[in-house]
Amino acid sequence: MRIFPSLIVIALAACDGGANAIDAKIFMDAPPAMISLWGTARQVTTTGSSAEPGVVLEAYQNTDESTPIAMAMTDASGEYSLPIVTNGIAFEGYVKATKVGLKTTYFYLPPLGTDFEMPSITLVTQGTYDLFSTVGQGNQTPGNGLIALVVVDEDGPVIYASVSSTPPLAPYRYNRNNFPDATATQTDGDGIAYMFNAPAVQITVAAEKHAFEFQSHGLKAWPDQLTMTLIVRCKPIHPGNGVARSAHDDARRPVNDRGARTVVPAIQMCDPT
């Protein structure tokens, strides 16, 4: 997975994860009247991933699942651009990606108050969706959703992180070679984790790693479809402690998954006390 670090300032949030956590987004300036979301849609198969043309993209506010506020379609290179009218308020919502023959993907985003280059939106066939459960021993039940999460900091995917949810889901799995692995217990260099058997209710997703803080957030898992999201790292608890901050600092291997890419919103502020 090629990493394109982003210096975009998204928001400031306090997130100690405890009773003192502040569930508020503090923007230094009001968002512009319009922002743009752009990126690439890719289909994942057993042999890798490739850009997917002809995918319909729709942006929705979390508070209104029936009315899209922007629409676009991927071009021959799988690329798209979505103009979002903000009315001076940060966009809090998701992007819905659909194409005949593929499962629908819902990508939930952090609050956005400026232009943002999206991580690649993953699409899969029914066969690949089922194979995720088979290979990862996810025991996916029809009627439940599958959540794919990317754990990131300002440099890209975070390795050695673990994920959790409220309510608890089962099982959690971690990516190896583009598919969930039944034996892995932490994220690898791509930062990807999975939550199987997610009911269609509000679910809070979170991540943890020694000396790291991440911002938990809520989302909806869509029945029999793929739901994606980012879990973004907050400001380091102990800067300079020598802990590997991302896949870039891990000497095991470079991060490369045939051209897919992750772009990360600016690091958020935490109050670990």
Image (cartoon, rainbow, N blue to C red):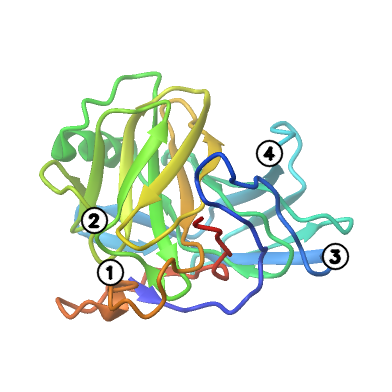
Mark 2 vs mark 1, CA separation in Å: 8 Å
Residue 195 appears at what percent x and percent y? 33, 37
Tag on residue 257?
Answer: 1
Q: Does residue 203 appear in the picture of this structure?
A: yes
Q: Quadrant of residue 191?
A: bottom left
In the image, residue 236 above or below residue 131: below
Direction from residue 48 to residue 41 in the image, left or right: right
- Circles 2 and 3: CB atoms closer than 8 Å: no
In the image, residue 133 above or below residue 45: above
How packed mark 3 is, by other alpha carbons closer than 10 Å (few <14, some 14-19, many 20 or more), is: some
Name the residue that disc number 3 marks: 30
Name the residue that disc number 2 marks: 178
Please report whichever mark, 1 or 4, sits nearer to the chain's N-terminal start: 4
Name the residue that disc number 4 marks: 62
- Of the two numbered discs 1 and 3 in the rendering, the one whose residue sits closer to the viewer: 3
Please report whichever mark, 3 or 4, sits nearer to the chain's N-terminal start: 3
Residue 250 appears at what percent x and percent y? 22, 77
What's the residue type where badge 4 is placed?
Asn
Mark 1 vs mark 4, CA separation in Å: 31 Å
